[in-house]
Structure formats: structure tokens, C-alpha cells
Amino acid sequence: MTKKISKRRKERARQRELAQDFSGESLTPDGFHTFYTKFINLRFPMKIAHVLELRYLINHAVDHYKEPSPTPTYRQFRDSLQSALDSFGIENQRHSERMLKILSMFRDIHYAHSIASRDAERQLREGMERNRDDYAKAVRYGLFFIFAGVSFIVIWLATPSAHLIVKLLPALYCWFSLRYFHKLPALDKEHDKLTQDVNDVLRRRVNSLNWKTLIHKLALVLGYKRVQGVEVFDVDIDHEQINRSAYH
């Protein structure tokens, strides 16, 4: 019993370690689902190395991000986020501007991720339609050659002096029929694979962003806000030294 409990504790510790480790993640449309899911489900406290690693990933990405032109839509988006930041108590102007740029980056990455996901789904569904067309065609041709073969067998039996070609055609038609029916299992397997791929695309799609949770956890991870009762780091260290990493 003690060994089982110890094994479960080790497994929980391993899962927690993986949930906080962003070393293999990227802030790109392709890797957005994995990053966003892990980030939105973060639990505190975190190891110092993981926090600093996550800060570096976010800051490195935003440093290379170019904000869109100040269109009316983008200004409206920034104004709504600014209100949310104010409600969260992020009053430092530098932190506020940095957060707005980070959130704008998240919005653009999410948009590119959504477009790529829908394009992938469309291509897979088109493949599924072609697969079902090929399946129906194989069944139709297979049945046609069976009917044709049976017809020539009837002609052969009804005509004692039937030509040799009449006697050979049923065998040929049977071969054609088997050839088409032989394709069906492979087409079914391909359809199952395409269905699985579609489900995987849908599972990995981030339909919408939880801005409230996103802002809250970004503020904590980047050191822009302190929440009473929530410790971001799992040890007591010099917070001033850590917070200097927020921009590096």
C-alpha cells in the first residue's frame, strides 16, 4: 500500500512538473492550442525556473511582434482591454502598455490559429467526401460487373453453342467485381483515419480566449500584480530580483 501511495505521489509530481514546463512550447499558430491550454490551467506556486522560462517565452515573442495599424476596430479592442486591466488593478503605465501589446499578440496568434484550423478541417472534410464518393463508385461498379457476369452466364446456359467469348466474359466480370470490392476495406480505413484527423483538429482548436483568466495569469506570471493568498513562486526569495526578469 505504501509503495502504491508513493508511486501515485511521484506520478502527480511528474504531471505537475509537465504542466508547468513550457520549455518545449512555442507562441505560434501551430503550437497555440498546447500553450494556451497549459497556460490557462496553470496552478500556483510554480518553480522559479519555470516562471522565468515562461516569462522569457512570452517576452521574447512580444519583442518580435509588430502591432497592427491603429484602425477603429483595433482601438476599440485596446480600449476594452484597458478597462479590463484597470479593473484588475494594473496601474503601472509601463506594465499596462506591455500587457496591451501581449494581449494583442495573443489575439493575432489566435486568429491565425483559427484560420489554419478551419482550413485543415475543410480539407479533411473534402477528403472525406471524396472517400465516400469513391466508396459508392466502387460498390456501384462492383454490383454492375456482378450483374453483367450473371447475365452472360444465363446467356451461356440458354445457348448450347455459345461463343467462347460468352463463356469467358463471366470470369472477366467476376475479376473486375472482386477488384472493386477489394477496395472497400481500404476506403473504410481511410475514412476512419480522416474522421480521427477531423476530431483531432476540432479538439485542438481554441474557439475563444478567456480574456479574464488570461489577464489574471499573465499579470501574476509577469509580476505585474500581487494577489493576497496567491504565491507565484514556490520558495521565498528576493522578489525584486525576480521581477527584473519581466522584461528580459
Image (cartoon, rainbow, N blue to C red):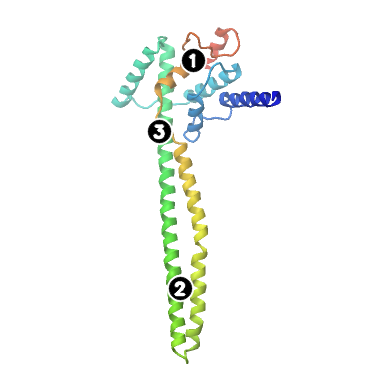
Residue sitting at x 52%, y 64%: 182
Residue underneath mark 3: 207
> In the rendered structure, which disc, 1 or 2, sits on the residue that comes first in sequence?
2
Secondary element type, mark 2: helix
Counting other residues with Cα less than 10 Å from the Cα at mark 2, is it few (<14), some (14-19), or many (20 or more)? some
Q: Which mark is residue 220?
A: 1
Whether residue 157 is visible here, answered yes or no, is yes
Compute the Cα span from label 1 to label 2.
71 Å
Residue sitting at x 51%, y 22%: 42
Question: Horizontal and vertical percent for residue 103?
Answer: 42, 23
Q: Which mark is residue 30?
A: none
Nearer-the-camera pick, 52 or 171 = 171
Counting other residues with Cα less than 10 Å from the Cα at mark 1, is it few (<14), some (14-19), or many (20 or more)? some
Question: Horizontal and vertical percent for residue 113?
Answer: 43, 35
Residue sitting at x 46%, y 47%: 195
Amino acid marked by disc 2: Ile
| Tags 3 and 2 touching, CB below 8 Å | no
Quadrant, the N terminus: top right
Classify residue 71 by image quadrant: top left
Compute the Cα span from label 1 to label 3.
24 Å
| Tags 1 and 2 touching, CB below 8 Å | no
Seen as rendered, the residue at the extreme right is 3
Compute the Cα span from label 3 to label 2.
49 Å
Secondary element type, mark 1: helix
Q: Is residue 210 left or right of residue 79?
A: right
| Tags 1 and 3 touching, CB below 8 Å | no
Total numbered circles: 3
Q: Is residue 71 left or right of residue 213?
A: left
Q: Which mark is residue 146?
A: 2
